[in-house]
Amino acid sequence: MQVTLSDNSIRLIKWLSVLLIAKVILFVLYGYRDYFPPNFEVPFLLGRQNYFFGSYAWSFYAHLASGPTTLVLGLILLNDRFRGRYPQWHRIMGRIQVAMILLVLVPSGLWMSFYALTGMIAGVGFATSAIATGVCAILGWRAAVRRKFITHRLWMLRCFAILCSAVVIRIIGGLGTVYGWDAPWIYQASAWISWLLPLGLVEVHRNIQWVEPLPQSDS
Ligand code: HEM
């Protein structure tokens, strides 16, 4: 499929997405004031006192540290200019990113999935996204080691798209607050839509040929 968009439009869409992701990261970090120490009156922690210790508390705080970090690292690593200018830093940060995803974010997300709000449908949605993130990170890393850089970029783009589920789910949550959607099925659906939608967009994006329209005349 062929879609005509100018370079400037593509650049604008990219920068708007970066701004949106940055805004959500700041919003998430602002919310941490309710987690240090844990305030069991806020919606996310409501009713979690019974198991908020040991493995859950460890996973929760490991997740709070690794989530925003992997999103910020992902933004930097996907930036072509940064990679071109500082290839050594790209390699170092890439290794940190893969280690953090595989050793901290995925295990903590998986463990927290067992306790997901609204139950099993949302839990399986989060758990599947955790596994998909890990698989993309492993395949992306393997391609880089084998110097297959086009494949590497594609897997890392998919990995980042799934990390952006944290952004999409909060946008859906924000819309829910504005429009008064509070049915449990909306949270269950968003646990799936939040990662399948950005992943789908990556697949659509790579099957479209984005071309700038050719000039129609010399004038
Ligand atoms: C694919 C990767 C991820 C998975 C599988 C995942 C999984 C989860 C799960 C299962 C929960 C608990 C949900 C519930 O109990 O209903 C959660 C909460 C949370 N996640 Fe993630 N997550 C991922 C990525 C991220 C990223 C990239 C961030 C960065 C912003 C993030 C930040 C948080 C925060 C702050 C919470 C606590 C709830 C809140 O304050 O909104 N997660 N995550």
Image (cartoon, grey):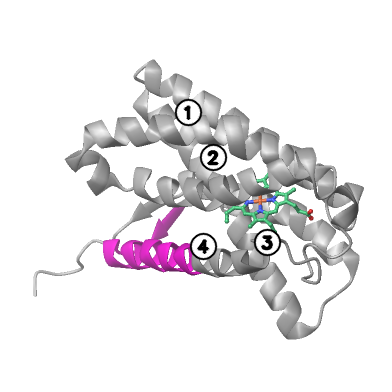
Based on the picture, tell me whether residue 22 belongs to the magenta stretch: yes
Residue assigned mark 1: 140
- Residue 85, can we see it? yes
State the CA–CA distance, disc 3 to disc 4.
20 Å
Q: Is residue 71 above or below residue 11?
A: above
Q: Please tell me which of labels 3 and 4 falls first in the chain.
A: 4
Q: Amino acid at mark 4?
A: Ile
Check if mark 2's residue and mark 1's residue have beta carbons within 8 Å.
yes
Residue assigned mark 4: 25
| Residue in the picture at 21% in, 40% down | 84
Q: Please tell me which of labels 4 and 2 falls first in the chain.
A: 4
Q: Which mark is residue 37?
A: 3
Q: Which residues are magenta?
A: 1-23
| Residue in the picture at 62% in, 56% down | 166
Q: Please tell me which of labels 1 and 4 falls first in the chain.
A: 4
Dot 1 lies on which element? helix
Based on the picture, tell me whether residue 177 belongs to the magenta stretch: no
Of residues 77 and 92, the one nearer the viewer is: 92
- Residue 128, can we see it? no
Q: Which mark is residue 159?
A: 2
Check if mark 3's residue and mark 4's residue have beta carbons within 8 Å.
no
Q: Amino acid at mark 3?
A: Pro
